Image (cartoon, rainbow, N blue to C red):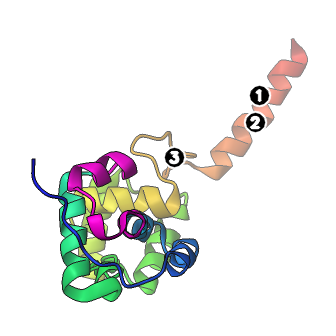
């Protein structure tokens, strides 16, 4: 069995516990690892023991110990995440799409036609699935929904129908 690796933890336990209270959730297991290493003192603690105590994977323990050994607490509490991708639509594009989708007489039969409309009017060639997910996320759209009213519906014919319907019901 391999000898436990000793890495000297320079911070005190009180400092580490204060860091745990103020740290982002993704860094808490890393700091907890340092606390466990500090508790063991100079005899060190094996990777397997850290895995068992903290419920971590072996690769995480190896990577985090190496990060701490190479760069201290600053390197251990840093990450290379860049953030989120910017949206493919600007605020103006979003508003135009919103106006189109909330207009009951827009004439769009589905997301394929919306894709064509975006290409023609906004000049962006965007994948169907991207448009679908964007509309679901921002407008609460669904892939298959009954239309509120037909685009070619004649409002005068509807009124005439309602008037004759009421008369025929009253005669019965």
Asked if the stretch drawn in magenta spans residue 100, the answer is no
**Do the residues under discs 1 and 3 have CB atoms within 8 angstroms?**
no
Q: Which residue is mark 1?
A: 165
On whether residue 46 falls in the magenta region, the answer is: yes
Q: Measure how far apart labels 2 and 1 are at the Cα level.
A: 5 Å
Q: Is residue 160 left or right of residue 109?
A: right
**In terms of secondary structure, where does tag 1 sit?**
helix
Q: Which residue is mark 3?
A: 150
Question: Which residue occupies the foreground of this view, 35 or 21?
Answer: 35
Q: Which residue is farthest top?
A: 172
- Residue 25 left/right relative to 108: right
Residue 108 in the image, given as x and y percentages of width and height: 39, 56
Does the CB distance between marks 2 and 1 fall below 8 Å?
Answer: yes
Residue 112, compared with residue 52, is above or below; it is below
**What residue is disc 2 on?**
162
- Numbered range of the magenta stretch: 36-56
Q: Is residue 106 visible?
A: no
Image point (51%, 46%), residue name: 150
Main secondary structure found in the magenta portion: helix
């Amino acid at each position: 069995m391999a000898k436990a690796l000793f890495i000297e933890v320079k911070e005190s336990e009180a400092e580490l516990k204060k860091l745990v209270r103020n740290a982002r959730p993704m860094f808490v297991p890393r700091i907890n690892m340092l606390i466990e290493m500090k508790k063991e003192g100079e005899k060190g603690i094996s990777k397997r023991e850290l895995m068992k105590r903290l419920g971590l994977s072996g690769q995480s323990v190896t990577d985090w110990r190496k990060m701490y050994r190479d760069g201290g607490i600053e390197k251990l509490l840093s990450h290379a995440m860049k953030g989120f991708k910017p949206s493919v639509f600007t605020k103006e594009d979003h508003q135009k799409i919103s106006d189109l989708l909330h207009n009951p007489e827009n004439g769009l039969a589905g997301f394929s036609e919306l894709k064509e409309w975006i290409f023609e009017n906004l000049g962006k060639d965007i994948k169907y699935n991207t448009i679908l997910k964007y509309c679901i996320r921002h407008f609460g759209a669904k892939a298959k929904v009954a239309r509120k009213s037909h685009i070619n519906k004649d409002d005068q014919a509807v009124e005439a129908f309602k008037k004759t319907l009421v008369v025929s019901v009253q005669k019965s």
